[in-house]
Structures are given as C-alpha cells and as structure tokens.
DNA sequence: GCCATAGAGGTAAATGTTTACATTTTTATT
DNA sequence: AATAAAAATGTAAACATTTACCTCTATGGC
C-alpha cells in the first residue's frame, strides 16, 4: 500500500507538502496541489486513518453501545447516532453483546482502546456508581434510556412514569373502568415506572386494578399471548389492557381475537414504544411513541458538543422526553 | 491518558517488557508480570488500538457496508456480521448511507482508510466492473446479495429466480389458477428475477398472468396498498397474489380486507423475505425465508478466511442460497 | 571453576502521519 | 536594485506501539 512518503518521493516534494494538500492546509501552491494530486491518484494512495488518529490524537469514530441489532428499537437507536455521524463525517463503531455488567464494561473499554472520544451508551446492567465514575472519566460519554440524578446532564431519557400516566388518562377518557395490565417480568426501571404511573392516575380517579389482572411475562409476542391467556383465565371482567410494549400488545390482541373478543369493540389494547410493527398490525395499534431515533440523535450531538474544546458545561440541563400518545385503532370508547 | 512509557517508568522496566506482558509474549518473569500488571491497573492504562494497528499492520475491525439500519433486513445482515465479529474478538465498523454509486464507493473507501482488511459489502449501485476491480484489490472483501459470474467465489447470494419458482409451485399446488403479482418499481435484479421465476413455472403449467394483473410500486406497506387498489380496479379475477416483499404483502392484505376479501379464504397472499413482521401480522404471512443473517455470517467468515495468510483460493466455490417456503396462514387451498 | 545455554530484559528502529519551526523562493514596495 | 514581507516548501520531532536483535545474568553439566 502506497504511503505518503511514496507520494512525496514520486512527486518530488516533501511529505509535509503532501500532507498539506491532503488536509487542504494553507500555504500550498496550485502547482504542487495538481502535481501531488495526480501522483496520489496514480498510486491509488489512501491515507492511513490509524496513523492520523495517532498523531492528531483525534478520533473520527462515534461509538455506540447497545445490546444487539436485531431488536428494531436498538437498530433505530444506532441509526439515529449514525445519522449524526454521517453529518459530521464520522464513522460508527458498534459494540454489542450486552448480557452482563462485565460485557457492558468490556464494550465500553473496546471503544476506549480505539480512543473513541464520543459515545452513546445504553446500559441497563452497570451500577449507578460505575456509570457516574465512567461519565466523569470520559468527557464525551452520554447515557441513553437511563436517568441518574447525579449526572442528569449526561442522560437522555424517556419519562416512563409520565408515559404510564398518559396511558391511564387516555383509557379513562374513553370511559373504561375495568383495567388489566401486562408488564415485563424483568425487574428493571422501565416496566416498573410505566405501571406505577398508570396505577397512580387510576387511583386518583378512584379506580384500582385487581392484583390478578396484572400479569408479567417475557416482553415478546409469545409473552403477550401467554399473559393474556392467564388474564382471561382469571375470569374477572376488564375492557382495556395497558401493555408494556408493542410486541406484547400484538400478542395480546392475537389471543383476545382467538377467544372471540373483538379489539377494540370488546376490549381496548394500548401498547408502548410505537415500533414499526404497530403500524402494520391489524387493528393498527394505539400506542405511546418512544422517539428513540431523535433521542439518539440528541445524545450523539450532546456527546459531540461535550468534546468540542469550547464546550460550556451543561450542568443543570435535563434531557427528558415525554412519550406521545398515538391513537390508532386498538383503543376505542367503551359503550356497553 | 497513561501510555506504555508511563507504565514502564513507574514499574521500573523497559517498554518492551510492558509490551510483552500486554501481549502475553514469551520471556517475561512472573515477577515482572505482577509488577507491571499492578501499575497498569493503578494508572488505568488502556493500550492504544490505533498505535497497535499502525505498527502491526493488522486490523481488528470488521467492516460492513449497508444502505441503512432502520430496515430490519439490513439490521439482520449487520447483526450476522457482528455475531462473527464478536466471536473473533473484532469490532464492527459500519458504513451506511448508500444512495448512489459514489456514496457506496465512499463508504468502502472509509473502511480502506481505516485499514480494515475484512469487509462485507452490500452494493446495488456500483457496476460489475467496479466491483470486480475492488474485489481483486481488496483480498478480504466479500459481496452479499449480489452475484457476479466472474467473481462468483466472492459472492454470497440468494437465488431469487428459484424463489419465484418455489412461490409459483406452492400456489399452483394449492389449486390456484388466476394470479396477480405485485413487484417493486425499482429496476434492480431482485424483483425482476423473482417475477421471472414465478412466470416461468406458471407458463410451464400452461397458465399465464394478464399484464394488467402485474403492478409495480414502492416496496413498502403503502406501495402494497396502492398496488392492490389498482389490481382490484382492473376488475379481473384472481385468487392468489405473489408479492415482492413482506411489507408490501401486509399492505396488500390490509387493502384486500378493507374491500371485503378474506385472506386466505377469498384470496391467498404470498410474501418474500420472512422478516419479523410476517410473524406478527394477522393472518400470519406465508412467505419465502431469506436467511440473511446466516448468509451474513457466512460472508463474514469467508472474508476472514481470505485474509488468513494460509488461505487457499476458493475459486470455483459458490455460495448460493435457496429461499425456503414458510407456510403460515395467508395462503390456502382454493376451494370455490 | 569453566563454558555453553537459556531465560529475562533492554535498545532502538519502524509504522504513517501531522505540524511547529526553519529555510527558501516569490512578490511587492520603495 | 535592494529590501521587506509574504508565500511556499522542507526538516525533523512527535504520536504509542511492536519486535528484531543485543546484552546480561543465572543455571547446570562437565
């Protein structure tokens, strides 16, 4: 592979000159530019990004840490970061495979080894303390989908509690009185807060949910189906279900229809996330929009700003997002 | 950031020794290992991957070139590559944003600048000649979803023609006689070959499709809806539709049901790709499985092998995949 | 006790760039 | 024509590593 020295030698100039034309630096004559450009093309010269990164101590890499790419939610996240990466002429370096605190840490370390300065991290397993330490050590690290009070200005997150409240208000406004809930069996903040917000508003309205009408399962299509079967087996009446996410909601609808219930005429179903799926389901799913792509773009931009030299510390700022109700076909006014 | 020199100085050894413990090289005493390891931990030392790559002339990066990440199909592709990357302790470098031949070329160039030796490239816009040239220049480049005779041993592809044939045989076996087709309006090989294979088998069976029962549109949900509306407007009878992809197929089902047709009782609909969506739709979509994740893994492994020093040239090999029929609920026997 | 040998560790060159600084060339001013 | 200023170019150090080669020390066989 041709190096800058080869180009310099053949063009009959110094490496400095070549470097200058490469970087469109100042003080190069048009004659040199032409001469060097030609040789570069002839030799098929491509500058070595590693050497560049080494000497300039800058990185053109934007790191993303997510569990995987198959989940469309995380794919959208990555896509949001990639969008700003492209805009800034940087590249995406992806670290995935997060199953434990150790693997999350390892994913971040990989980025550090690459001297990646800007990173958007989705971590559910690392502890608050570890994350705080990390954020203080790495100036361009921004957390997404997580809120830690002490480093609030470095967190881009969704208000799940408020999401639950919005869901409850929507269903109450549709005249529903008897509710069921399907939540995720995993003990992380998201399902807990969504349910908490939901129940809080219900309680204020004088309604509450029978414990046997709250079911937990895997946050997948199957999980939704199974949870709904148990809900129906409980034998208690309900006219609306608030479901943890869209995949489970679609599973729920499937089971309900198989059992002779029409959605939304007999039972309303409300999802969460607004993934692509929800627009393709029949009936089209009413859900709460989780603007993950925009959030990812914001996170990437914040991370980028933090690493800019004249960055003002944005302490005190908050990057909370509120989910937006998307009324489609799976929820309707209770008439009977 | 602490460097290897800092570690050496503080541990009271030479940089060579530090490097040796870092790389678990030979000729280091346990005493030195312990001493150096402690200092590394104390200083929070992380080796610089750029410097390493520079001096060793090796890369631990696996490059992927795809149009975007939002499309679940490409996300699966990326995920397949990422799976083997993790297995080999390498990282994913993603280049996206392919809208033109130039941007595809640029994406590949970015990987070359990083001295990425192993790459899986999905290109639809670059010409055969350019790709052949590229493949010959970069020993670790493998093409996915594209077949070019001259470099067949570097192509991992799906037999779209055969896919169309399988679709036709399936629908014929279900006793259908009157067919409609919905294809993509984009003039690339995939839709053309699928349709060609489909028509070929039909013709052999003595059936053919009226020209007004072949519609073209955007390969999306909306495209499928619009195409189906035009199909119905044509006024000709048909009992089965072969659709270019799953998104369009789901759009087609949606329009059919809105017009009072029951799928599959009145009309069977067969999709292509077997994306996540197809399992979530109602009725569940019958489709042809495109094993993109496995194909991506194979492509990555081939690319990896090509760059191994003792690699035998695999000229003469072929990496063709045949789509597999996945019979779900949207196709059924024609009774009436 | 001598010498060959192996094991441990050090020295310094090399990797491909950028860039501060020094030097040379060109241009403008008088 | 001389000189100052500006522009163009070159020189060499620096970036963080790896590794071939060299030196030193300890060990053991005789």
Image (tube, coloured by chain):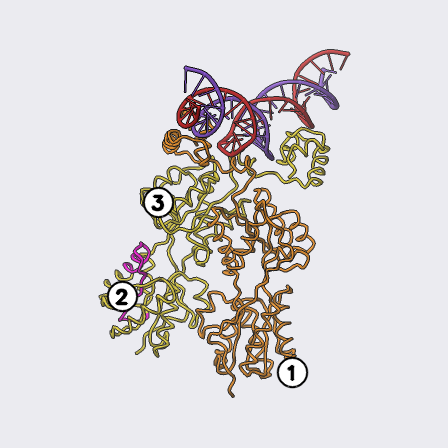
Chain colours: A orange, B yellow, C red, D purple
Give me the chain letter of mark 3: B
Q: Residue at x 52, y 63 (%)?
A: A291
In the depicted view, which residue is nearer to us: A292 or B38? Answer: A292
Give the residue pinned by disc 1: A206
Q: Which quarter of the picture shows residue B190?
A: bottom left
Disc 3 to disc 1, C-alpha distance: 69 Å
Give how far apart the Cα atoms at labels 1 and 2 are: 58 Å
Quadrant of the rendered structure where residue A40 is? Answer: top left
Q: Chain of mark 2?
A: B
**Which segment did they paint magenta?**
B174-197
Badge 1 density bin: few <14, some 14–19, many ≥20, Cα 10 Å? few
Q: Which residue is mark 3?
A: B152
Q: Residue furthest bottom?
A: A336
Same chain for labels 3 and 1? Say yes or no: no
Q: Are marks 3 and 2 in contact (CB under 8 Å)?
A: no
Whether residue A56 appears in magenta in the rendering, the answer is no
Determine whether the residue tagged by mark 2 lies in a helix, strand or loop: strand
Q: Check if mark 1's residue and mark 2's residue have beta carbons within 8 Å.
A: no
């Amino acid at each position: 592979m041709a190096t800058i020295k080869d180009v310099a030698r053949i063009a009959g100039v110094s490496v400095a000159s070549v470097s200058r034309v490469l970087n469109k630096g100042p003080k190069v004559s048009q004659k040199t530019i032409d001469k060097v450009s030609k040789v570069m093309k002839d030799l098929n010269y491509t500058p070595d990004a590693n050497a560049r990164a080494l000497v300039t101590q800058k990185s053109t890499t934007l790191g993303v840490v997510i569990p995987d790419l198959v989940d469309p939610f995380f794919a959208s996240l990555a896509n949001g970061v990639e969008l700003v990466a492209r805009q800034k002429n940087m590249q995406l370096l992806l670290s995935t495979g997060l199953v434990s605190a150790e693997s999350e840490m390892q994913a971040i370390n990989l980025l550090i080894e690459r001297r990646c300065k800007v990173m958007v991290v989705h971590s559910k397993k690392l502890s608050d303390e570890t994350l705080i330490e990390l954020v203080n050590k790495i100036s361009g690290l921004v957390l997404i989908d997580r809120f830690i009070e002490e480093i609030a200005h470095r967190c881009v997150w969704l208000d799940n509690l408020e999401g639950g409240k919005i869901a409850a208000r929507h269903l109450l406004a549709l005249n529903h009185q008897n509710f069921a809930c399907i939540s995720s069996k995993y003990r992380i903040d998201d399902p807990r807060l969504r349910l908490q917000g939901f129940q809080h508003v219900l309680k204020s309205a004088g309604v509450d949910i029978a414990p046997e009408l709250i079911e937990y399962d895997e946050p997948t299509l199957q999980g939704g189906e199974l949870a709904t079967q148990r809900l129906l087996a409980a034998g208690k009446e309900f006219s609306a279900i608030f479901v943890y996410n869209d995949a489970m909601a679609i599973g729920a609808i499937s089971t309900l229809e198989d059992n002779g219930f029409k959605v939304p005429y007999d039972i309303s179903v409300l999802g969460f996330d607004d993934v692509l799926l929800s627009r393709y389901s029949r009936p089209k799913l009413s859900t709460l929009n989780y603007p993950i792509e925009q959030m990812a773009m914001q996170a990437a931009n914040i991370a980028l700003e933090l690493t800019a030299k004249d960055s003002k510390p944005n302490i005190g700022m908050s990057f909370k997002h509120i989910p937006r109700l998307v009324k489609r076909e799976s929820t309707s006014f209770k008439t009977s």
